[in-house]
Amino acid sequence: MIDHFDRGAIARVARTILAKLVQHQPQSISRLAHEYQCPPRLIRAAIAALQDSGCILEHQSDRVLLRQSHWSWWRGVLEDISSQRGAMIGRHVLTYESISSTNDVCRQVAGQAGRPEGETLVVLADQQSAGRGRQGRRWEARRGQSLLLSVLFPADPHLNAQTVTLCAAIACAKAIERLAHHPVHLKWPNDVMVAGRKIAGILVETIPARHPRKSGVRAHPVVILGIGINVAQAAEDFPSELQNKAGSLYMAWGQKVDRLALAVELLDQIEHCCMPGLSPEQIAVEWKSRCHLVNRMVRLIHHGVELQGRVTDLDPSLGLVITDAHGRTHFADAGATSLFES
């Protein structure tokens, strides 16, 4: 049956169906045919093309369910969904099978002369060999196990790197909760936790405005937001020193989550939470609802100085509000090198 249709038409319908499946599951073949005004045989041919490319789909009578998308479709599907939603993030996507760091690609693009002001970019990698976490820590990921992405977007003068980090953590938590229907907790300043294990990390880098001498073209300030989410790892996939600390969505729920579907949800949440971002009041409410630090005693090393006290609040711009034993108030921003609950 596939030979009876133009291959280009099959590919276009296949991409459209995949975009539909990652947003709404399952889908009826007859309903898809009616919606796209094409014969059911073309829908079936498109589904077969998705399966031939490596997508894993489950058939339930007239319905089809996506279990796992294939990497080759990601760029087109994300750009299509962004266009359909009228979103800013996702209009321009780059994908790499293997790369050192998605943040590095964003940094290179941000430095290109003549780049339009306000343009966003999403960079995804199937495998990352030299990803960076906070304070220079390494964040490596094997092929097919994690959602690894960076988003380049214009800086907002009212949001510092710490506030963007908090907004991104909230976006990450919301995306996971919506897709997996399981509560997510946040640990200061950028750890996303499930069942006591870290499943995601966030790294925010800012690039100030520059005035190139030769071209005279102004380079506008931008933010690079890098996020890594452990999706398919088992405990033995982590180094021995992390096996009691690190986790994944698969370990938490015992079932695989499609990374493309997670990327769609995450980019949508990033747009709502980070561009220009939640209000300080919204950040405080969302963060504190997922973080158990308020009213707890903590000890931390903040810019080389040890500090102990009780966390009394969160200020999105200044950090954790801590009251020490002498009643003095301290603000611990994301520069704290370590934090321990007493």
Image (tube, rainbow, N blue to C red):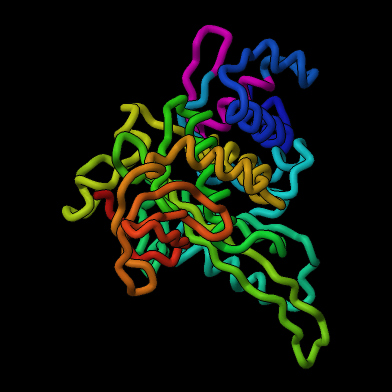
267 in relation to 331, above or below: above
Q: Nearer the viewer, residue 45 or 319?
A: 319
Quadrant position of residue 235: top left
Which residue is most to the front?
326
Residue sitting at x 65%, y 50%: 274
Q: Is residue 175 visible?
A: yes
Residue sitting at x 66%, y 75%: 208
Q: Nearer the viewer, residue 97 or 47?
A: 97
Residue sitting at x 48%, y 40%: 288
Q: Position of residue 178 (x, y in %)?
A: 53, 29
Quadrant position of residue 263: top right
Q: Position of residue 95 (x, y in %)?
A: 57, 55
Is residue 61 magenta-colored?
yes
Residue sitting at x 22%, y 52%: 242
Q: Position of residue 270 (x, y in %)?
A: 62, 46
Residues in magenta?
A: 42-64
183 in relation to 301, above or below: above
Q: Position of residue 45 (x, y in %)?
A: 62, 24
